[in-house]
Every structure is written in structure tokens, then in C-alpha cells.
Amino acid sequence: MRSPSLWEARIMDTPGMPPYARLAEALRQDIATGSIDVGTRLPAHRELAAELGLAVGTVTRAYAVLEREGLVRGEHGRGTFVTGDDAGATDLVDLSVNVSPPALGAKVLRQALEGLPQTLPADVLSTYPEPAGSPRHRAAMAAWLTRQGVGASADRVLITHGAQHAITVALIAASASGGSVFTEHCTYPGALHAARQAGQRLVPVATDELGMVAEALDAALRACGRGGSRTVYVTPTVHNPTGATMDERRRRDIVQVCRDHDVDIIEDEVYSIFRPDGLTPLAALAPERTWYVNGLSKSLSPSLRVGVLAVPEAHGARARAALQTTTHAVSPLMAELVVRWIRDGTAEDAAMALRAESEERLGIAAAVLGGYLPFVPSGGFHLWLPMSRQRAEESERLAARAGVLVTPSREPMTAPGGEEGGIRLCLGGAAESALSLALGRLRVVLEGGSPHGWAG
């Protein structure tokens, strides 16, 4: 006769988390806190399903998850028991790295690699490539930008080692060392690092649910005065980290402010595949002063280090000089892969799949985190939870103890010593089941609880 289970059956009440994950998390917490002793037999599948009003398959799946984690073991004919191996351990879910879910399968990659010898000249590996990219590759990227709403000719296009490299080149060429770069009060950490490395002064500009506020930018530029180099770095589409997207009026207002003060714009639009219909890139509104940055890492693969910088017509020589000080050229093999996928429709197919995946993951996050989000972005794979710097740092620490890594709160802050802060959550890297679990744990942290019984 089986010994009775001593566990008081329960399931987490976490909106948006699948039932099996909610059950697994309840058990995981109770094992970690010692509410269930090692060696305890858990209720039989049918028994627990009936008690909690679940399907038997839901219980089976939850037990299987815990068994893979080493927290329980199933013994044929006897039942499922809490083990002593790694009891209390927590699967670590990394929500700190801003990558998209996989969009390219092994078959697509294999076919593309097999086709390279038919499209590349035989002598491509026996000479140095052109620093800005071959004319054929630049023409293909210019055509791709045209489909993105940016009508840049091939002679205005530079191919770079990803969008981060394009930002660095634009900062070097558009803003002198010692100059001022005006940007959102929190923004992409890579741009902040590049500006600091180039010896440029960062000036934070207030934002709202639509991104950079035009009136705040105007005030900041007036306060700075017209002496010295001044440049505006801005992300109008799915801003990183807040997820804000400017409407058409805001875009035109930002451009007008920049024209009034005669400053150049560096437009970061790596998330252009998520730009809603009817919105115009700043580069199309002000091509004479906009350095347009894009890349394929967010829409095809993080390992595709191919970006593009479309430069204002009058600044081509400066841009090429800055490009050559930072690298000689992008590998023609990598550029050829990207061009091939653009031309055969693979890039657009991947973009469509990512848009659908983004909608699903943002929906999960909205269901779980609810009122903690000021708004849900129109696309992309990251969210921003604004809060004081102190609370953000404490929440970051408690989340890590609960097995959830988030972007360090100081990383995206333009003025890191201020009182403002927040937590960025990156939704693309984890499997959906792990994402739901991690968001549920984070909600407990935000509610002031201790997801695994830890003090905090």
C-alpha cells in the first residue's frame, strides 16, 4: 500500500502562465522552502488532477518538468518522490540578452551555403574586398532599404559589421570628439558606450509612451547653445529599452526641431520590421541630415554581423573615412548570404514569422505582468518596467535569486547616476514555457514576495 502524500496540493495563481507551469512552479517553491520534505511521495497523477480540477496530462507534464530538473523522480509502481539531488535548485532563465527567437532553420542555412559558389566570383577570397562593400552588395542593400521606406541610392550605402558598428561609424563621422550627443534618457547601451568611447558628451532627453519628446529635445538643444558639435541619436521604432514607437506627428516634430537647430540625426531602426504601416522613417523625412542605421541581426539571426548605414549625400567621404578607421571590410561571404536571403524572399519570410512570434510573446508578458507595464509595445522582443534606480537594483537582485536574469538597471541609462531606473526584459531568447515561468517569478518579486522562500 502506498504511503500517503504529505503535500498540501496547490497551484500558482499566475495569469498567462500555462497550467502545467503553474503547478510545476508551486511544487518547485514548496520543495525549495522545505514545505515538502525530501522523500515525500507526491499525489498520483489522477488524484492530483481531480483535486485541483486539472487534466491528467497537465499533471503528467508538470511532473516531467520537475523530473528533468532533478527535483523529483518517478518509480514504476510506487509513484513520484521528491529527491535530495539538487533540491531547491532553480532553472536559470536569462531575460537579459536582447535576441530574437530563431528565424532560420538548418535546412535554409545549408541550402544557402551550398549555393554560394554559384554566386560569388572565384577570386573573391584572393583579394581585399572594398571597404564599403562591393557595388553589387550595396545595390542589393539599397533595394532592401527602399522596401523599408528609405530611398537611399547605392552610393550612399555602407555595409558594416552589424548595426552596432554602423552606430559607431555614424557617431565618429557626424559628431566630433568633445561634441554633444542628445538621446533618450535611457537608450541602447551599445550607443552609449560608443559615444563615451568617442569622447562625446551625452545629454539625456525626456521620453513618454511615444519616445523622445520633441519639446524636451528643443529645450535641451537651446540650453546647450550652438557652439560645438551637436548630434541627435534616436530610436523612433520599438525603442530600446522602452519599446516605444513614435507616431507620424512625433516623427515630424522631431525632424522639425532638428532642422530648427541645424543638427544631424542618427536614426537607429534595427526594428524596422515591426514599424506599423503608415509611419515614415526619419531618413525619408529629412534625408539631408539623417544617418540611417539598420541591420539583420534582429530580423534574421544575431550571428549575422551585417549592418547598413545610409549616409546624408553631403557626408559620404567623412562616413567612408570613419568606416575605414574601424574596420577594413565586411566579409563578402557573410554579405553574400544576407543579399541572397533578401533577394529570394527568405528575409521577408523570417520577418513575418518574427512579427507573429512577437505578438504572441508580448501577449504572454502582458497577461502575466499586467499593471506593471506602462504600455505594451507594438512589436519587438523587449519590455521596460520603469521604477526608481534603487527599486530597480533591488528587483534585479531578487529576480536573480529567483532564477531570472534581467538587464542590469544601470546599463541603458544615459545619466547612470540619476534617480530614474527600470528593468528591461528580453523576451526572445527563452523557450515559451521558460518565459512564462520566468515572468511569473518576476511578478512575485514585483509584488514584494520571495518566489522561493528567500528573504529579501
Image (cartoon, rainbow, N blue to C red):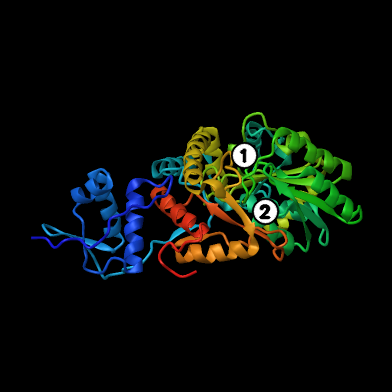
Q: Is residue 18 above or below residue 193?
A: above
- In what quadrant of the picture does the N terminus appear? bottom left
Q: Position of residue 399 (x, y in %)?
A: 49, 62
Q: Quadrant of residue 389?
A: bottom right
For the residues labelled 1 and 2, say whether their Cβ atoms are less than 8 Å apart: no
Q: Is residue 30 above or below residue 301?
A: below
* Residue type highlighted by circle 2: Thr
Q: Residue furthest top?
A: 278
- The residue lying toward the viewer, choosing from 163 and 31, is 31
- The residue lying toward the viewer, choosing from 164 and 230, is 230
- The residue lying toward the viewer, choosing from 259 and 395, is 395
Instruction: Determine which of the numbered discs, if any, sits on residue 99 in the image.
Output: none
Q: Position of residue 347 (x, y in %)?
A: 52, 37
Q: Position of residue 250 (x, y in %)?
A: 74, 37
* Residue type highlighted by circle 1: Ser
Q: Secondary structure at mark 2?
A: loop
Q: Position of residue 266 (x, y in %)?
A: 74, 47
* Residue corresponding to mark 2: 187
Residue at left offset 39%, top offset 41%: 107
How far apart in space, not on screen, are marks 1 and 2 (Cα)?
Answer: 17 Å
* Residue corresponding to mark 1: 272
Q: Name the N-terminal-most of marks 1 and 2.
A: 2
Q: Is residue 307 above or below residue 78?
A: above
Residue at left offset 69%, top offset 58%: 192
Q: How many marks?
A: 2
Q: Secondary structure at mark 1?
A: helix
